[in-house]
Amino acid sequence: MKIVLDAMGGDHAPEDIVRGAILASRSCRSELILVGDESRIRPLLQAEPPEREIQVVHSDDNISMDDPAGPSLRQRKGASMVLAANMVRDGKAQAFVCAGNTAALHQIALTGVGRLPGIKRPALAVVFPTHPTPSIALDMGANADCRPEWLLQWAVMGSVYARLVLGRDNPRVGLLSLGSEEGKGNSLVAAVTPMLKQSDLNFVGNVEPTGFFRSQVDVAVCDGFSGNLILKTGEAVAEWFMGQVRQAASSSPLARLGGWLLRPALRSLAQSHDHSEYGGAMFLGLRGLVIKCHGRARARTIENGIRVAEEILTSQLLTQIEQSLERETAPSKATPCPTD
Amino acid sequence: MKIVLDAMGGDHAPEDIVRGAILASRSCRSELILVGDESRIRPLLQAEPPEREIQVVHSDDNISMDDPAGPSLRQRKGASMVLAANMVRDGKAQAFVCAGNTAALHQIALTGVGRLPGIKRPALAVVFPTHPTPSIALDMGANADCRPEWLLQWAVMGSVYARLVLGRDNPRVGLLSLGSEEGKGNSLVAAVTPMLKQSDLNFVGNVEPTGFFRSQVDVAVCDGFSGNLILKTGEAVAEWFMGQVRQAASSSPLARLGGWLLRPALRSLAQSHDHSEYGGAMFLGLRGLVIKCHGRARARTIENGIRVAEEILTSQLLTQIEQSLERETAPSKATPCPTD
């Protein structure tokens, strides 16, 4: 297996991307390929030689965090992100890990890697540290305006992920909404509900964020606009909370002592909600595996992104998703014609 | 000033609603009125006599947390929620505080209390403990499918609230979206942006949840579906975090000692994100003041809900909102006719 990385994407590129690959080279079994400015990558590899050789593919151009997605990206044929996506399309790599511009990556992956047969829109899938067991939610930001049939496909893809990677026998699928009762929600929720009910999925109805974070479902689907706001609210509130805990732990001499004694336990809490432990989000629905790491990713996030890519490649997720989509859209599942 | 309460609404009604009114009677200057089952309310008032007399209005019926909003509510003329809303309409009270069924309250307030002139849809407005200064966001769940002009009106109402109640001179208004750059968002965001730009408001553009929780705006607007998911995600993540901190503080004998020393500081953190400290959300856009307390409200939440109602009545918020809406929709602001 080969995993390609955009060495130039992300706030701390190329240093942390290269260092992440070096860290991963100690444990992963895949061959790693770094795409980017060779004159900046080589010295980093020489300074801290990897356990196993890492291939470097040179590129002159790279897409910045501020570059808008749009037609102008078509001109950027030599950009590291484009070259890396094309390597997946051409079978030169099986997975692509990237911490760069999300909107640009979405567009480049769509045209470069391409969609799985029958998939209307790929979705950004994120595994959340819900308690007591993790759950997957999609779409977390790839598609702002959505059609009902897309959410059905995302539910199918999420279910396969929950079964193969999270190890759930019969994954419970929920529709994220503002009330758990049927009928509560917007017009999209109303349109998707009968489609999910009619499917072969284990659809358990609407789920509120409170229920989602209490692991009442294994898979949650929603439109990418709401999903992205949920994702970022979770991140913002967690950050707010850690700041407040830190402040509480410096509010008096006794609280400072308490905070010092509690530090090791709190450090693992800080890690448990830290994106670097999860490696990243996936664009599900593409012909190849594309993992999006956080734009602020440091080396450890990249290392985990590579680990996650390897796990997913081993699980044969994409093949299984393709088969499940075929079943879900087989003629017997289609609404009968009036003449039938 | 008179404030009416639905004594029968909420998970802990009537006990905690009555107790909340008793607590509030010690400090508030308004006359309080409890609407509900007199045979259950009177003994509670006798057991713990309030500082000042609290009026009781009997009702035989009450709307439960599970009653669906819809045409059937029209038959419930004797329900405590309906009687209380009608008292605001008839000028027998200036504010209504309720911990009952949100969807039913929205519908009953719309028909019972009525809208301010020109208001298309009332919105649920919530003040968040964003850091370093609190901010108001709307709509947090009253309207699932929204039109662009509604968001403009909510921005106007939120601005007046931020000026009068939060004390901001020139409140910064943001549109909640999945990217802070213009052009990122769904079709609703795209439609609202030019309307906000053209308004007299201090519109600062798109804001992500991360920016919102860092107080980058004083007022944030979005559709009620996304807004409600944000509200509940915030609540869920805060709950998740407090659970994890508790778990961290019992992970070893030293951590337990640390947790014990840190307890007073953490208790005030738990309070700072607790809805009971904020009293509740407001339905802004109605002819009278309606405060929605959390369904799980205990006495202290109700007490704070009454305090918030009194503060808002004193600020003349509704009169000011009405004047601002008139300005915002004055002929000079309208798009000129082609013949002009």
Image (cartoon, coloured by chain):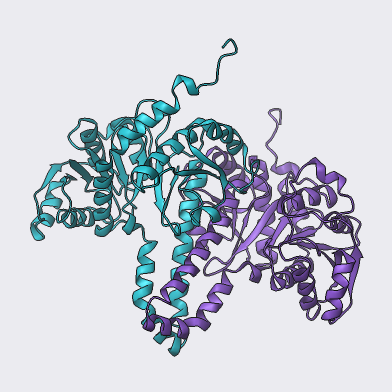
Chain colours: A purple, B cyan
Q: Position of residue A299 (x, y in %)?
A: 72, 72
Query: In the image, is residue A175 above or below residue A58?
Result: above
Which quarter of the figure has residue B315?
A: top left
Viewer can see residue B269: yes
Q: Position of residue B277 (x, y in %)?
A: 32, 58
Query: In the image, is residue B97 above or below residue B211?
Result: above
Viewer can see residue B286: no
Q: Position of residue B34 (x, y in %)?
A: 17, 46
Where the C terminus of chain B falls, by quadrant?
Answer: top right
Q: Is residue B66 left or right of residue A195?
A: left
Where the N terminus of chain B falls, by quadrant?
Answer: top left
Total marks in image:
0
Instruction: Name the residue furthest bottom.
Output: B253
Which quarter of the figure has residue A91?
A: bottom right
Q: Is residue B36 left or right of residue A222?
A: left
Q: Is residue A318 left or right of residue A250?
A: right
Q: Position of residue A228 (x, y in %)?
A: 60, 52
Question: B335 or B98, which lies in front?
Answer: B335
Question: A28 or A106, which lies in front?
Answer: A106
